[in-house]
Amino acid sequence: EQSSGSFAQLHLDMPADTTMRDLLERLSIPLEDRGITFINGELAALPGLDADLEIVLNDGDRVG
């Protein structure tokens, strides 16, 4: 983990075909606690809207 100004970065090695749900499970973040999700700067989900859970993440994707 490294800090860059007012935000932190965490680089993870994940297997191919990892979904957003897999990432949340690896980070032990309950689905109901994740809030608003962005993938590569694009809005992917809002609280109560689980549209992002089956998105497959690619090498170098940025999630916030």
Image (tube, rainbow, N blue to C red):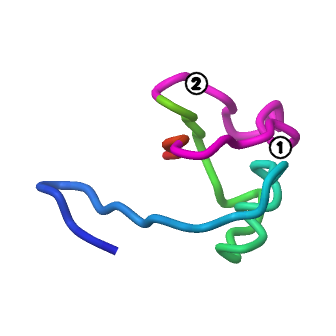
Can you give x and y, in whole percent of width and height, for residue 6 in the image?
A: 17, 55
17 up-or-down from 42: above or below: below
The answer to which image quadrant residue 9 occupies is bottom left
Residue at image mark 2: 43
Q: Secondary structure at mark 1?
A: loop
Measuring 81% from the left and 61% from the top, which residue is drawn there? 22
Q: Residues within 10 Å of mark 1 (few under 14, many from 20)?
A: some
In the rendering, which numbered label is found on residue 53? Answer: 1
User: Which residues are the magenta region?
Assistant: 41-60
Q: Is residue 61 magenta?
A: no
Q: Is residue 43 left or right of 53 when viewed as pictured?
A: left
- From the viewer's side, name the closer residue of 31 and 17: 17
Question: Which residue sits at x=55%, y=41%?
Answer: 61
Residue 41 x, y percent position in the rendering: 46, 27
The image shows residue 2 at horizontal and vertical percentages of 26, 70
In the image shown, does 39 or 11 lie closer to the viewer?
11
Asked if 44 appears above or below 4 in the picture, the reply is: above
User: How far apart, in angstroms, are the residues tagged by discs 1 and 2?
Assistant: 13 Å
Above or below residue 12? Residue 46 is: above
Question: Which is more N-terminal, label 2 or label 1?
Answer: 2
Task: Look at the numbered disc 2 and give the secondary structure of its residue.
Answer: strand
